[in-house]
Image: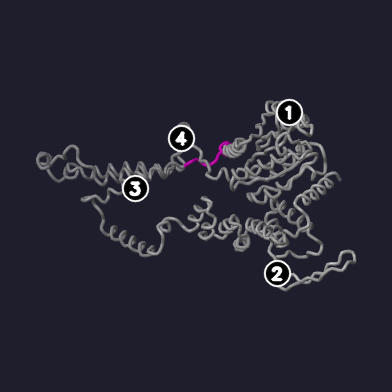
Amino acid sequence: MIGDFHFLRPAWLLLLPVAAALGWIVSHRQDMRTKWQHAIAPHLLDHLLVERRVGARIRPVHLTILLLVLGAIAAAGPTWQHERSPFVADIAPLAIAIDLSQTMDSTDIAPSRLERAKLKVKDLLEVRQGARTALFVYAGSAHMVLPLTDDKKLIGTYVDALKTGIMPVSGKNTTKALATIEAGLARETVPGTILFMTDGVEPEAFEAFARHAGRNELMILGIGRAGETSNGGANFDVEALQRLRSGAGIRLASITADDQDVQWIARRAASHLLQAQTDAGTRWQDIGWWLMIPITLLGALWFRQGWTIRWSAAALLAALMLQSTAQAAERSFTDLWLSPDQQGRLAYDRGDFGKAADTFVDPMWKGVALYRLGQFDRAAEAFARVDSAEARFDQGNALARLGKLSQAVAAYEEAIRERPDWQEAKDNLKVVQDAIAAKPKNDEQDSNELDDRPDQFKFDDKGEKGKKSVVDVGRQTAEVWMRNIQVSPTDLLARRFSIEAQEKSE
């Protein structure tokens, strides 16, 4: 702790000799004997001088010297510890890998191992508000369901769609799952945590876990009841998981009826990122600002009666204060100290996204707040005002949530053109393209992209006469369109995983 003490900006310490020199100069100039020794004979000077009384009061020059010393130390930035980001919990990425092998349908834990794992994922999303989470599944093959995202509603939708039957290859291949997840997190700039939710790890995967030397921490949440055989005949081998923990140093926890396991996972994800940032040399915490408190208090002493004040400066200060007061007559007290974007960030951090959206001036931040608020149309408009790859990516997310899939594809493609190595944009683009491919053949456009003219649809199933109906598709909302999709998220995932498995086998 003390050994780490240093100054972030040591050049400001050069003011300390200046303060010492100022004290010497003032003291020398106020020495009457030195001042008059060349003009008055020494034997007369001794009788003309009045010696300064001991215990003289503190004078303005002393205050000036003290302020210079404190100001120099504060500006130099004393520090002895690393700065912990207040957003560690928000930015700590977590990749969740859910075991979808057939044994996860066992009912030793009600309603089943898989359903309990899905509930734990939703609990994690609530605990890690605003944090980025990726979703993977595996059995005999491994697949990414969603890349890292902070949209908990989207993750919840896909979590609900998970079933063991959607996996194209039976069995359990945890080694392949680990490789797939590491590849999915390879482009991340910060270390993350990989959480396996499983009822067991096959012995063949022990070596892969032991060899793991990546920056992402590995954790396992055991799903099952120890010492029992489920209705499906699948044992929960706690001893094997414990051997894996001791042999490979994997952090292991068992599922609990309360949220202790969820809280433990969230804390570990945040602390792992913090430790990794500290080891990598994160910013040092600047302690110098604490010295502003005594500096402000000492500065107030300048207004003591009898202390020298240059009235011209005082008049200028008074004029500036009057002008500021006049300009702030119709503004709130907060407006005097914080910009609109700073006020918006405070509201955003409190979770008041509505106030944040109304307060932000920066269109990017306004769009983020509107997205969190669920106003995706306004969010897309805000992102459109920013010319950056990040804005195009976020605009694509908002358009996808509105059901404007073709426009979302265009936004993602533009983001990828600006940042060709952006894996998250590529993953989202693929998800949207899969959704477009899964739409009914007669839906050539997104419902929200159609004009207000009524269209006529004729239904004739195998030659049977149907009734002609007129539908005002211009008034259909994205929600109505989503309800009309004939392919469920479960079917969509099953088709996608099947295609991916075939491509890898070729």
Q: Secondary structure at mark 1?
A: loop
Res. 5 mark: 4
Residue 228, label in figure: 1
For label 2, the crowd category at 10 Å Cα-Cα, with few meaning under 14, some 14 to 19 and many 20 or more, is some
Badge nearest the viewer, 1 or 4: 1
How crowded is the residue under tag 4: few (<14 C-alpha within 10 Å), some, or many (20+)?
few
Name the colouring of the figure: one colour
Name which residue type carries label 3.
Thr
Report the quarter where the C terminus lies: top right
Pick the front one: 234 or 307: 234
To which residue does mark 3 refer? 296
Mark 3 vs 4: CB contact within 8 A: no
Report the mark closest to the observer, 3 or 1. Answer: 1
Mark 2 to mark 3: distance in Å? 63 Å
Does the magenta run of residues contain 279?
yes
Q: How many angstroms separate mark 1 from mark 4 (CA)? A: 56 Å
Q: Are marks 1 and 4 in contact (CB under 8 Å)?
A: no
Q: Secondary structure at mark 4?
A: loop
